[in-house]
Amino acid sequence: MGLPGEGRALSFPRMPPPPRYNVLGVGVCALTLASARDLIVSLGTRDPHSAPARYVCVTTVHGVGEARADPAFRRILNASWLTTPDGMPLVWLGPRGIERVYGPDLLLAVCDAGRTVGLTHYFYGGNPGVAEELSARLTARFPGLAVVGTVTPPFRPLNATEAATLRADVARTRPDVIWVGLGTPKQEHFMAEFAPTLDTGVLIGIGAAFDFHSGRVRQAPRWMQRSGLEWLFRLCTEPRRLGPRYLKTNPLFVLRTFAQLTGLRRYPLD
């Protein structure tokens, strides 16, 4: 199935970010996949004296659960340029007309449409070889796609030397978009820390999209994605790793959402 606008020449005027709605204290942007794509691509013609880089959080029920447990992480989501509804429960709780902005689909949509304005891309994350394989597959799928860098970082936080090396490489290659695949909440902490000092337009945290589009991990069928059952597919494929996350996070999300919707508890935006 094609993505919105795939293969067509599009126009991308600068646009303000959309309004947010409150999901358990996290401000989620009211978006569609097409509007998220257009907002990101509209940054492609940035001038060299523009504001510091923005960052985009692609947020699921898991991310909202992490934000409830960690106020500092919640502030990162709420301070983002965009926090998108990646997960059908977040879509169902939003205003009419919004869509799921799923990280793997957002990656494909921006890579495709960004060719119109010469958008350049940099892949940061994944296990050894994943970023390179992702780059190879995407450049084969989207002829003319400009990838200017791929990096596999260590699993631990960067030390001062490694951070300086990253900043120098980004300053040299000047990517318009840095795609970050470190998993939640690590990638969001990374983006919030490094966005002010990197010479780029926008950082986007897309987690498992690195593994999906490099061919390392299978994606759930589309019908499961649309019906809110992707978590079940992933649980069945990786029960040991994802079991503790889903079996704790999902029921807690339902209880908290019930409390918010019925007024039993308020979750103010920080």
Image (spheres, rainbow, N blue to C red):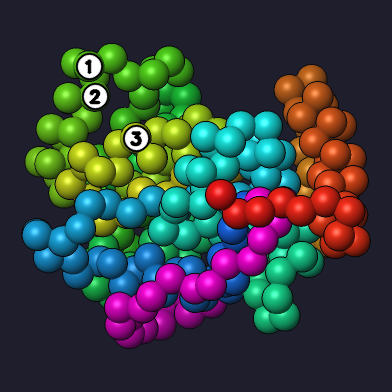
Q: Position of residue 263 (x, y in %)?
A: 86, 60
Q: What is the C-alpha distance between the residues marked 1 and 3? A: 13 Å
Residue at coordinates 48% horizontally, 79% vertically from top-left?
5
Q: Position of residue 205 (x, y in %)?
A: 47, 45
Residue at coordinates 70% horizontally, 76% vertically from top-left?
95
Local packing at callout 1 (Cα closer than 10 Å; few below 14, some 14-19, many 20+) is: few
Quadrant assignment, res 46: bottom left
Q: Secondary structure at mark 2?
A: helix
Q: Is residue 55 magenta?
A: no
- Depth-wise, is mark 3 or mark 2 nearer the camera? 3
Range of magenta residues: 4-25
Callouts 1 and 2 close, C-beta under 8 Å: yes
Residue 193 tag number: 3
Q: Is residue 221 visible?
A: no
Q: Position of residue 14 (x, y in %)?
A: 30, 78
**Sequence order check, earlier mark of 1 and 3:** 1
**68 shown above or below 269:** above
Q: What is the C-alpha distance between the residues marked 3 and 2? A: 11 Å
Q: What is the C-alpha distance between the residues marked 1 and 2? A: 5 Å
The residue where tag 1 is placed is 160
The residue where tag 2 is placed is 163
Q: Secondary structure at mark 3?
A: helix
User: What's the amino acid at mark 2?
Assistant: Ala
Q: Secondary structure at mark 1?
A: helix
Q: Is residue 7 magenta?
A: yes
User: What's the amino acid at mark 1?
Assistant: Ala
Residue at coordinates 82% horizontally, 56% vertically from top-left?
260
Callouts 3 and 2 close, C-beta under 8 Å: no
Taking the image as shown, residue 126 lies to the left or right of residue 215, namely: left
